[in-house]
């Protein structure tokens, strides 16, 4: 009974924290903008692929990247993602990293509903199960993280450790892309972007705290440079993932892998879960495994992925004569969306 009373007291105390109560709504607002931004960016990437006559599954070309800068839908999506970042950074100022990051899973639900309406690919039972696993695993995690998460100042040693790990991650991902990019599919780019964005969130948190404390030394400048580099590579991976898979698959990976990486850094390097008892750490592990299983399942069973591989007979439009196209084909454009 004593243990249950301690948990109850911590739960009440956590939600009496003004910073937490402000940080969570900001994170949820960021998730909404992320969902809308992903949908518009995905539309822009598809348009550029159609105009260029080449897919970007093995990496977008420089010409395709330049083409994105002229697409209104892609620009609108980028602005929305910018608002999502602003909301997330504001949330990081108010609440612990391991509470804010997982709440992005809300974007997965919104993106799934939007993509189903726009593309006509209604979620199947298997894809819904995968989405429930993603969101359920993340929210199980954030519930206990909200109770036990603590914050402390990041030392220079901890910061050096984060930067060193990030350098290794960028080298490994870059090598995989150079050697295996013609064989990579959306899941690689999604996971790679999620890992990088997990470091971006962590470094952003560190930089914000140091600026607030007036501690803007050379190592903080290095953090800003590393943050920009990781964000740039992650953004490229995301755009390439849009050409390889549906937007809700991309968001699923980002909203699961990103917070898991940020959480691991927060727990292992920054000590934000130092107050959590062993049984809570077990729950963290189980919740993370469930969420990752959901991402892998969505990559395998998403109806649009299956349809594109011609394994599921879904009508994708008409050829102009009223006859439906072959399930594996896709219309070259949309009369109702000439400028997207």
Image (tube, rainbow, N blue to C red):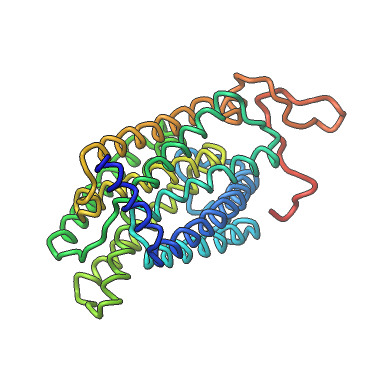
Q: Residue at x 30, y 68 (%)?
A: 224
Classify residue 103 as left or right of residue 336: left
Residue 109 in sight from this viewpoint: yes
Question: Image quadrant of residue 46?
Answer: top right
Classify residue 144 as left or right of residue 246: left
Whole-percent x, y for residue 292 in the image: 39, 34
Q: Residue at x 45, y 31 (%)?
A: 294
Residue positioned most to the right: 321
Rendered view: 324 above or below 74: above
Query: How many marks on residues?
Result: 0
Residue positioned most to the left: 157
Whole-percent x, y for residue 262 in the image: 32, 51
Q: Residue at x 51, y 56 (%)?
A: 28
Q: In terms of depth relative to the viewer, which is nearer, 103 or 169?
A: 103
Q: Work out which quarter of the rendered image holds the N terminus and state it.
A: top left
Rendered view: 323 above or below 6: above
Q: In terms of depth relative to the viewer, which is nearer, 144 or 49?
A: 144
Q: In terms of depth relative to the viewer, which is nearer, 54 or 251?
A: 251
Classify residue 270 as left or right of residue 141: left
Whole-percent x, y for residue 115 in the image: 64, 41
Residue positioned most to the front: 1
Residue positioned most to the bottom: 214
Q: Residue at x 65, y 25 (%)?
A: 328
Whole-percent x, y for residue 100 in the image: 40, 55
Question: Image quadrant of residue 164?
Answer: bottom left
């Amino acid at each position: 009974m004593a243990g249950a009373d301690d948990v109850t007291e911590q739960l009440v105390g956590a939600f009496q924290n003004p910073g937490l109560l402000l940080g969570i709504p900001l994170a949820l607002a960021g998730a909404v903008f992320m969902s809308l931004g992903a949908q518009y960016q995905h539309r822009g990437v598809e348009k550029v692929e159609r105009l260029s006559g080449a897919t970007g599954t093995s990496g977008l070309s420089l010409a395709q990247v330049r083409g994105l800068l002229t697409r209104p839908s892609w620009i609108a999506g980028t602005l929305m993602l910018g608002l999502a970042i602003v909301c997330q950074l504001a949330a990081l100022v108010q609440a612990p990293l391991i509470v804010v990051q997982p709440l992005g899973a809300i974007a997965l639900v919104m993106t799934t509903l939007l993509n189903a309406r726009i593309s006509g690919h209604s979620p199947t039972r298997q894809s819904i199960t995968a989405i429930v696993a993603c969101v359920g695993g993340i929210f199980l995690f954030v519930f206990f993280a909200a109770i036990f998460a603590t914050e402390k100042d990041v030392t220079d040693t901890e910061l050096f450790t984060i930067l060193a790990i990030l350098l290794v991650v960028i080298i490994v991902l870059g090598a995989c892309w150079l050697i295996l990019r013609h064989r990579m599919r959306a899941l690689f780019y999604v996971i790679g972007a999620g890992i990088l964005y997990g470091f971006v969130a962590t470094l952003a948190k560190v930089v914000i705290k140091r600026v607030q404390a007036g501690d803007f030394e050379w190592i903080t400048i290095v953090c800003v440079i590393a943050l920009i580099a990781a964000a740039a590579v992650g953004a490229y991976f995301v755009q390439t993932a849009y050409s390889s898979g549906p937007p809700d698959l991309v968001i699923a990976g980002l909203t699961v892998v990103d917070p898991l990486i940020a959480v691991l850094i927060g727990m292992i390097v920054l000590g934000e879960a130092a107050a959590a008892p062993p049984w809570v750490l077990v729950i963290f592990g189980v919740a993370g495994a469930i969420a990752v299983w959901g991402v892998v399942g969505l990559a395998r069973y998403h109806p649009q992925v299956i349809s594109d591989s011609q394994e599921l007979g879904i009508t994708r439009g008409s050829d102009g004569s009223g006859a439906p196209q072959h399930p594996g084909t896709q219309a070259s454009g949309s009369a109702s969306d000439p400028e997207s």
